[in-house]
Amino acid sequence: SYDLTQPPSVSVSPGQTASITCSGDKLGEKYAYWYQQKPGQSPVVVIYKDIKRPSGIPERFSGSNSGNTATLTISGTQAMDEADYYCQAWDRSTGVVFGGGTRLTVL
Amino acid sequence: QITLKESGPTLVKPTQTLTLTCTFSGFSLTSTAVGVGWIRQPPGMPLEWLALIFWNDDKRYSPSLKSRLTITKDTSKNQVVLTMTSMGPVDTATYYCSHYDYGGNSGFDFWGQGTLVTVSS
């Protein structure tokens, strides 16, 4: 099976840059997706196809994907960005795969 | 405007079969490169993908749960149904359905509000 690994938690000060990584075998050869989930809410896609931002997602959210690692970067992090973030990819044999999630704390 | 809503029992007993319905609007499952997926999340735990059905009736299942899952669609009703057999306490979770943009590779771009299913006798 295919696995995606994320750090359980990341902390960042307001206004600083947060980076959340997602690791998987040859992940750079697949599309990576990132979802934001706030407590009690459904997930929202914030990055698709590695680098694309859906309409309505602030420009401070960006993504990259190369080698075995995809990265979600939040520039100028705001308190409202505090949430759980999940990466996701599609594997030909496994299907949809989600990472274990990263809790972003803005302190 | 795409919307999805999950419905089904909030409480099931161990060993029973769970049947959940996703009723959607704003798109058709007859449209090329569209899919609907089911994802669950136990309390305090990460997201777990369960199943995905495509416009062409292609179906994919989580390898670890494949033997227990069946996903079907009713295009006339704009519904997708998920059944999961042999329910146990570990299956207690919020179950989400989501629109999957296969053609545009936008991922799970629209989600339902989720429905909490508790497995208990």
Image (spheres, coloured by chain):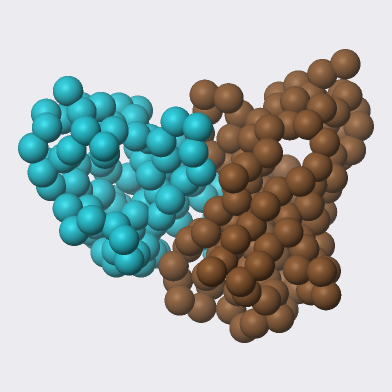
Q: Position of residue A50 (x, y in %)?
A: 31, 63
The answer to whether B62 is drawn above or below residue A67 in the figure is above
What's the residue at 76%, 46% (across, down)?
B7
Q: Quadrant of residue A86?
A: top left
Q: Position of residue A72 (x, y in %)?
A: 25, 49
Left or right: where B18 falls relative to A90: right
Q: Residue furthest front?
A: B1
What's the residue at 84%, 45% (across, down)?
B19
Q: Position of residue B30 (x, y in %)?
A: 71, 81
What's the residue at 61%, 29% (across, down)?
B42
The brown-coloured chain is labelled: B
**Number of on-image labels:** 0
Q: Quadrant of residue A84?
A: top left
Foreground of the two, B106 or B2: B2
The quarter of the picture where the N terminus of chain B appears is bottom right
**Chain A rendered in what hue?**
cyan
Q: Is residue A65 visible?
A: no
Q: Position of residue B61 (x, y in %)?
A: 69, 54
Q: Residue furthest bottom?
A: B32
Q: Is residue B54 visible?
A: yes
The answer to whether A26 is drawn above or below residue A5 in the figure is below
Left or right: where A92 falls relative to A84: right
What's the residue at 10%, 44% (across, down)?
A76
Foreground of the two, B14 or B19: B19
Foreground of the two, A49 or B30: B30
Q: Residue furthest top?
A: B121
